Amino acid sequence: AAKAAGRDRVHLFSPGLRDAARWRMDVANRLRDGAQDQFVVHYQPVVRLDTGEVEGVEALLRWQHPERGLLGPDAFLSVAEETGQLIPITRWLLHETTRQAAEWAEQGLALRMAVNISARHFSAETLVRDVRAALRDSGLAPEQLMLELTETCVAEDPTRAEDQLAVLQGFGVRVAIDDFGTGWSSLAQLMALPIGTLKIDRSLITAAERLAAGGTGAVLGAIVELAHTLGIRSVAEGVETADHLRMVREAGCDSAQGYLLARPMAARDVERWANRVSD
Ligand code: C2E
Ligand code: CA
Ligand code: CA
Ligand code: CA
């Protein structure tokens, strides 16, 4: 595996309670006043475990804060969601990431672009329109775009979720269930849905590690096997150590993502990283 490159140095932000309230106010104000211009996207490679090749990247939102430096989603995402700003931000992000993926494809670097979609956006009328507009404007092949949805997106209204997924699949976009293992839905519930990929949450990787004391995680293996039976690919998240990598490989995961393989990084670092790996 390649060494971690192009580190994204996000500032950890853990204010006290009173400061937290003040911070949330400040974020809300700044978002209202157009701080959206200060958002940037970092990309974390997803690596195939059979060939070691990079198959795609996940787009992760960052805020280049004028005073605080580069901030990760923990510092602002929940405020953006509450104030209703996350949908317009994601609309921008869909345009930016599909444009970037199309540009890479032109350079011969075909990377599937994965974008996180909030539950609120998923249940909004605009999602389908937003996705379609981004694809049209960028010219990106729909199969090269993957939407990452959490279990809560589909749990709230499964029937509507199925319809929404069918529409998205209708124009060729791929769909993944994100953070699998953190919610309460079972694979049986999820298998009714047209999803292509299961992203297995980091907490399941570390739990499997504890249970198996360094051996193969039987639970992990069972999940992956059931997913495969249903024709669903699996991506292990949060692979941080060589032990994790060995474990998820033995469990049969198709791909992996994590600090051991690559950190989230700026677009130009992705190009450098991908070229170095293929050398
Ligand atoms: P996520 O979708 O599960 O994204 C993966 C998170 O795990 C990222 O954190 C990534 O930097 C981190 N990560 C990757 N590899 C490792 C590892 O080996 N170890 C550990 N400990 N962490 C690793 P990040 O960028 O801070 O994002 C946190 C969450 O914020 C994301 O979790 C996602 O739920 C949300 N998020 C990020 N960008 C967006 C966005 O554009 N839209 C929406 N709706 N949510 C977003
Ligand atoms: Ca995700
Ligand atoms: Ca995840
Ligand atoms: Ca997660």
Image: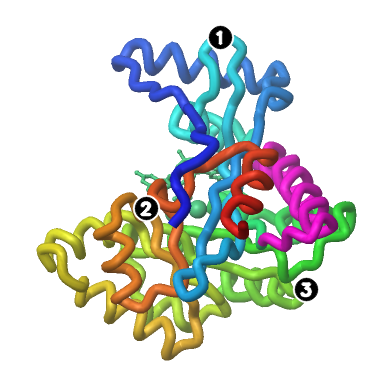
Q: With respect to residue 36, does 93 lie above or below?
A: below
The residue nearer to you, when weighing 224 against 92, is 224
- Residue 216 is situated, as x and y percent measured from the top left of the image, at 20, 73
Dot 2: within a 10 Å radius of its alpha carbon, few (fewer than 14), some, or many (20 or more) residues? Answer: many
| Residue kind at label 1, given as amino acid type | Glu
Q: Which amino acid does label 2 sit on?
A: Gly
- Looking at the picture, how far across and down is residue 251, in whole percent? 30, 76
How far is mark 2 from mark 1, CA to CA? Answer: 30 Å
What residue appears at the point 88 percent right and 59 percent down from the top-left corner? 139
Left or right, residue 120 beside residue 128:
left
Q: Mark 2 points at which residue?
A: 238
Residue sitting at the far front: 279
**Do we see residue 129 in this rendering?**
no
Decide: is 26 above or below 151: above
**What is the quadrant of the C terminus in the image?**
bottom right
Cα separation between marks 3 and 1? 42 Å
Farthest residue to the bottom: give it: 229
Residue at which label 3 appears:
171
Q: Quadrant of residue 151?
A: bottom left
The location of residue 178, given as percent across then percent down, is: 46, 60
SS at circle 1: loop
Which badge, 3 or 2, is on the more N-terminal residue? 3
Tell me which segment is drawn in magenta: 87-111
